[in-house]
Each structure stands twice: as C-alpha cells, then as structure tokens.
Image (tube, coloured by chain):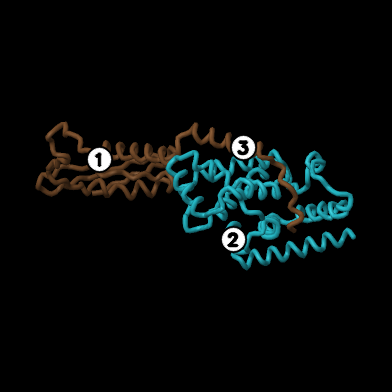
C-alpha cells in the first residue's frame, strides 16, 4: 500500500495559507475558556439575586385562620334527592349540594314536603309526598 | 509514513499544547506545523480533492483549538487529532458529493510518471477504485492501517472500535479488494 500513497496535492504555500486562515479565525473570536468564565460569572450573579432575602412588605401572618360556627346539614332536603336522580337520565344527573344551615342547637322541625312533577303527558302527573 | 521534521519530540508538542491552551497562538501554529502533513494525507486519502483537503485541514485545526482543553495528555495526541480529522472528513462528505478516491485529472497530470510505470499506475487506479467501493468503516480502517500505517490499537482508538473489530474489518476489506482486483484480470 505504501507505494499507492502518492504525493500530497498541497504545497508549502497551501499549508501556509491554511495556517494563516486558522490563526486569523482563532484571534478574531474569544477563546472558549473566556466565554465559559463569563457564563459562569453571569450564572453566579443571577443565583445571588434569586437567593437574596427580599424585605417584607407587611407584618401580617401568611396564614389567617377564621373560626366559624359549626355547620349541620339539614336532612330533610337529602330525602328528596334520590327521587330526582331516579327521574333524570344518568348522563344529565347533577349533584345538588345540600344547603348548609347554621346550627341552632335544636333538632330540625318536622316538615312535610310535597313534590308535584309534571310529565310530557298532560293527563299524567306525579305527586310525591314525604315527611 | 514519514516523520515530521519540524516537531517530532512529544515533549515539545506537549509544551506547545499547554501553551496553546492558555491562548498562545504562536504555540498553536507550532502544533499545526508539526501535524498538518499527516492530517492532509489522511484527508487526501479520504476525500481525494485538493480543495476539500484544504477545507478539511482548516476545519480540523479550528476544532482542535476549540476543544484543546478536552485533550487528555496521557493519550496519544495524533490519535485524538486523527479522530477529529476523520469526523471533519465525514462531515464534508455528508455535505457534498459521493466518496471519491481517484486522482483528479488536473493533479494526475502533475504527478511525474515514468514510461515503465504506466502499468503500475493502472494498478493504482484500480486499487483506489476498489477501496472506494468498500463500506465506510472498512474503508476508514484500511486507510488508517494500510495507507497511514497506524498500529491496529491506534486505528481502533480513532474509530472507537475494539482492536478485534478493526482486525476483522481490515481482513474483510483486503479480501474485497483482492476480489475486485482479480475480477478485472
């Protein structure tokens, strides 16, 4: 294989030309370590700014707890719910949040609920009475 | 491969590398003077075009300068340099045209050939054509091992393969070349 190498197509002038071009490019731009040093310095400055403790604007505590009186759910409304859900189609079923009533200490009054449900047929009407 | 007369001493080369790392452009010029012919030879055998060789040379040295900090002084500098040069040649190839391993006609005219060498010249052209047909890995292995005459271990380090793999690649490449040469007789 040695004899197949042949002469190089470049002469001394070509090599000198390449060297000159490389050196001019190298000298034109800052070296990588210098850029790296700038980048590290910038990162350190940014980190210091982020980590510096900022002065507080108010003396208020961050979390305020409000004490409210205990709430009870009135059971009377809850009784109505199953009947409604049975009538409505499953996909349209909507959760009805029970109304919250402040506790009075006394048991809920004994009330009677009457539901009058009209259907598509004017001759058919559903009346639901519960206690 | 002929030894470079400018800087053959590895200690001098190492001193230039250290100086170049700290930004000494004169030291980097010393490195280029010491290594440019080897890089050009490799690029020439891969690219086969004088203009591309110049481009490869320039890009190789720019990359060397850029990554000089990554060079491990315990390793062979030429192995590291060849690896960069090989990558540059690969990039140039993917950017441009298919592999070529033929002497361009304008350069062929410049090479002085005696009358009795005509037959040999034909063999050279056929051999180059045979190398040109090899798969890329085998091609690089045979160029580095048989033309650049690097030891197998060094070729393996440059190609990022094991010495055993390189041996197989070289053996396959030689068999293919032999077959190619014999088929034309």
Viewer-side label of 3, 2: 3
Residue identified by numbered label 3 = A16
CB under 8 Å between discs 2 and 1: no
| Among the 4 quarters of the image, the one containing residue B105 | top right
Q: A14 or B181, which is in the foreground?
A: A14
Quarter of the image for the N terminus of chain A: give it. bottom right
Q: Colour of chain A?
A: brown
Pointer 2: residues within 10 angstroms few (<14), some, or many (20+)? Answer: many
Above or below B142: residue A92: above
Q: A4 or A103, which is in the foreground?
A: A4
In the rendered image, what is the letter of the chain coloured cyan?
B
Precedes in sequence: disc 3 or disc 1 = 3
- The circle on residue B154 is 2
> Looking at the picture, how far across and down is residue B155, in whole percent?
62, 60
> Looking at the picture, how far across and down is residue B86, in whole percent?
62, 50
Viewer-side label of 3, 1: 3
Drawn side of residue B59 relative to residue A120, left or right? right
Q: Which residue is drawn at 49% across and 42% down?
A: B27
Pointer 1: residues within 10 angstroms few (<14), some, or many (20+)? Answer: few
Q: Which residue is drawn at 27% across and 49% down?
A: A79
> Looking at the picture, how far across and down is residue A106, in whole percent?
10, 47
Q: Distance between the residues labelled 2 and 1?
A: 50 Å
Q: Residue at x 60, y 57 (%)?
A: B159
Specify whether disc 3 shares its chain with disc 2.
no
Residue identified by numbered label 1 = A51
Q: Mark 1 lies on which chain?
A: A
Q: A114 or B22, which is in the foreground?
A: B22
Q: Which chain carries label 3?
A: A
């Amino acid at each position: 294989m040695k004899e197949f190498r042949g002469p190089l197509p470049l002469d001394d002038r070509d090599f000198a030309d390449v060297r000159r071009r490389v050196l001019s490019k190298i000298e034109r731009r800052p070296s990588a370590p210098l850029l790296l040093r700038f980048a590290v310095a910038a990162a350190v400055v940014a980190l210091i700014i982020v980590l510096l403790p900022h002065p507080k604007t108010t003396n208020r505590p961050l979390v305020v707890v409000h004490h409210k009186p205990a709430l009870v759910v009135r059971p009377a409304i809850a009784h109505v719910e199953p009947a409604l859900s049975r009538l409505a189609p499953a996909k349209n079923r909507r959760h009805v949040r029970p109304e919250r009533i402040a506790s009075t200490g006394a048991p809920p009054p004994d009330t009677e609920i009457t539901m009058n449900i009209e259907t598509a047929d004017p001759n058919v009407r559903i009346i639901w009475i519960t206690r | 491969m002929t030894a470079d007369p400018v800087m053959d001493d590895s200690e001098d080369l190492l001193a230039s590398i250290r100086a170049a790392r700290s930004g000494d452009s004169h030291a980097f010029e010393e490195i280029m003077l010491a290594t440019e012919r080897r890089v050009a030879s490799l690029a020439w055998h891969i690219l086969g075009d004088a203009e591309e060789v110049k481009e490869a040379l320039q890009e190789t040295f720019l990359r060397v300068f850029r990554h000089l900090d990554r060079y491990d002084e315990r390793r062979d500098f030429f192995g590291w340099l060849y690896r960069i040069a090989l990558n540059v040649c690969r990039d140039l190839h993917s950017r441009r045209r298919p592999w070529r391993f033929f002497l361009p006609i304008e350069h062929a005219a410049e090479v002085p050939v005696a009358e009795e060498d005509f037959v040999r010249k034909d063999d050279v052209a056929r051999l180059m054509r045979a190398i040109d047909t090899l798969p890329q890995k085998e091609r690089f292995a045979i160029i580095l091992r048989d033309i650049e005459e690097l030891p197998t271990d060094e070729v393996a380090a440059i190609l990022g393969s094991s010495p055993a793999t390189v041996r197989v690649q070289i053996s396959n490449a030689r068999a293919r070349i032999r077959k190619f040469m014999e088929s034309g007789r």
